[in-house]
Image: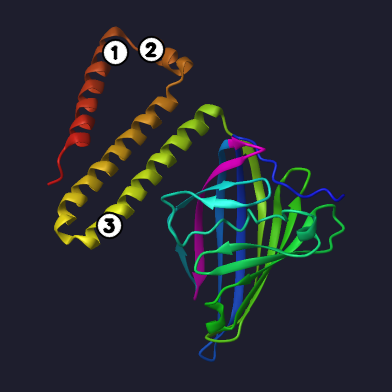
Amino acid sequence: MEMLPRYRLSVGQELTYETISEFKGQYKGEPDGMSEGSTAVFDVVAGDPPSGWRIVGRSKSWLVRDGNRRDRDWELVAFDLKPDGAATMSRGVGWWEGVPEVFPALPADEAQIKGQWQRELPLEARIVYAPATDASGSFAFTGDVIDPLDRIHLHKRQLEFQFDPARGLLQSYTSKESRDWGFVGQGTGRAILKDLQVRPPQWMAQFSRECDAYLDAVLRNQEARRAASDDPAKQETLLKEQRRDFVYLSVAARREARSATTTPGAARIRRNRRSKSTCRRGRRKCASSNSHLRRELYREPA
């Protein structure tokens, strides 16, 4: 019986993947090309091996075309991952977001590992996986992206994954693509596990709380926008409620950040360095600051 490859993650792990790709070809008969890349950091914030893990990811990407570089804002994604790679996106994540490619699905049983398996993607797309030959000791497999929209541009894209069964995570993948309509040409890409570290439990717990609070606020915002489109008369009321939610979230995040940096040892060092008069001034300043935060938290939008 062949041992099936499985994810083997642990709470507290932080995985950093770097991705870069290049596409060269022609657009309207003129030579054209572009390159893009990203750095994605994934934190395992909860879970255990039998049932799976909750993963929160942050990614920042860039694009270069015609000599101009454009940096995109950080994006947040969260999902639940099972050992076989089955995944469910978290509530509050945009409907267009899919499971990151560095967490591919794995074969569920022996029949699939000898044949094919797949994962559904947004907008009725899917990726079909199949085993590949590899002599490095890793589990190698390919992934063909099948997207109805690609038929318009005559676009094809295939990935080849290198999964490390011993560590239970993806080591790297390479990609090849071609396009025969519009921006005609060919491209290649690569993603690699750049870093793996373990975060302290206190840091991971705070990060998880902040992400949950943010996604809850985004979800309420999505629901409010749907409600406003159904009943325009409620738009002003819903806008005030959403502003109050995000003000509360901002204040709570600042408070968490302050508390996380105030370890008992650091607090004792600061106290020993202050005189009594300095401490009194500090307490008055702190009280004034807290009053400002309370006013900001409960202030009605103008």
Q: Residues within 10 Å of mark 3 (few under 14, many from 20)?
A: some
> Relative to residue 297, is residue 286 depicted above or below?
above
Cα distance, mark 1 to mark 2?
Answer: 8 Å
Q: State the separation of the CA atoms marked 3 and 1.
A: 47 Å
Percent position of residue 207, x then y = 47, 36
CB of mark 2 within 8 Å of CB of mark 3?
A: no
Marks 2 and 3, how far apart at CA? 48 Å
Circle 1: is it few (<14), some (14-19), or many (20+) Cα within 10 Å?
Answer: some
161 left or right, relative to 43: right
- Pinpoint residue 272: horizontal percent, then vertical percent: 40, 10
Q: Quadrant of residue 110?
A: bottom right
Q: Nearer the viewer, residue 108 or 208?
A: 108
- Residue 198 is covered by the magenta coloring: no
Residue on which the image places disc 3: 225
Q: Helix or strand or loop: what does disc 3 sit on?
A: helix
Q: What secondary structure characterizes most of the magenta part? A: strand
Residue stretch rendered in magenta on the structure: 47-66
Depth check, front residue: 91 or 72: 91
Mark 1 = which residue? 279
Residue bearing mark 2:
271
Left or right: residue 83 versus residue 290 is right
Q: Residue at x 46, y 15 (%)?
A: 264
Is 60 drawn above or below residue 252 in the view shown? below
Mark 1 and mark 2 in contact? Answer it, CB < 8 Å.
Answer: yes
* Local SS, label 2: helix
Looking at the picture, tell me which residue is in the foreground, 111 or 89.
111
Residue that appears at 78% across and 43% down: 166
Whole-percent x, y for residue 159 in the image: 68, 66
Amino acid, disc 1: Cys
The residue carrying pointer 2 sits among few (fewer than 14), some (14 to 19) or many (20 or more) residues within 10 Å by Cα, namely few
> What's the residue type where badge 2 is placed?
Arg
Tag count: 3
